[in-house]
Image (cartoon, rainbow, N blue to C red):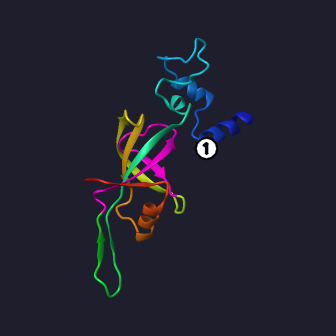
Amino acid sequence: MLGGILDRVMEYYGLASRTQRRSLEAPLSWRGSADGTTFAGRAGGIESRRLMSIDVEANLKIPSLTIKTAGEPDKRINNSSLRLIKRVTLDAIPKAGDTMRLSTRVGKPFEATVSRVDWDEGKNLFVVACSYARRSITADEHAVLLTDPDWRVNQLP
């Protein structure tokens, strides 16, 4: 009875049950200590990535937008040479093609697609280049991003 409930709870949270873990186990290429208590799971597996979080710098590219006003010509805002930078804490270093969730202080969280990840020696952290996941951005979302104190605007040459 209890085993079935526990398996359902573990399945809900995306955790492997004891029998699944045994079938997934592979020889460990590295253990944190002689008895192996500080490192659980396969090297490079999900378990090893959840041990601690990491600070990275998100370098966000946002789409250009057109603001339409009645009685006036359309106003085009070109964001091709604009990047927004923010330091964020992630559970693991994302790979190219992954989606990460970013936020502002005021607006709701949004998705960004990772295009590349580089190590910056000067900053001593990973820089995650990403782009706004949706094809377009609203004028309100654009204004919130540009005025948010957590995000720094970087104008490319």
From this view, report whether residue 86 is shown above or below residue 126: below
Q: Position of residue 22 (x, y in %)?
A: 57, 23
Tell me where residue 140 sits by quadrant: bottom left
Magenta-colored span? 79-104
Q: Position of residue 29 (x, y in %)?
A: 47, 17
Q: Which residue is drawn at 50% across and 24% down?
A: 42
Q: Residue at x 54, y 58 (%)?
A: 105
Dividing the image into 4 quarters, which one contains the N terminus?
top right
Report the residue that reaches farthest toward the bottom.
71
Report whether 79 appears left or right of 50.
Answer: left
Tell me where residue 79 sits by quadrant: bottom left
Q: Residue at x 38, y 59 (%)?
A: 134
Q: Which residue is drawn at 39% across and 41% down?
A: 127
Report whether 112 appears left or right of 63.
Answer: right
Q: Where is residue 55 in the image (x, y as percent from the top left)?
A: 49, 39
Tag 1 residue: 12
Foreground: 128 or 133? 128
Dot 1 amino acid type:
Tyr
Q: What element carries label 1?
A: helix
Foreground: 61 or 125? 125
Report the residue that reaches farthest toward the top.
34
How many numbered tags mark residues here?
1
Tell me where residue 52 sits by quadrant: top right
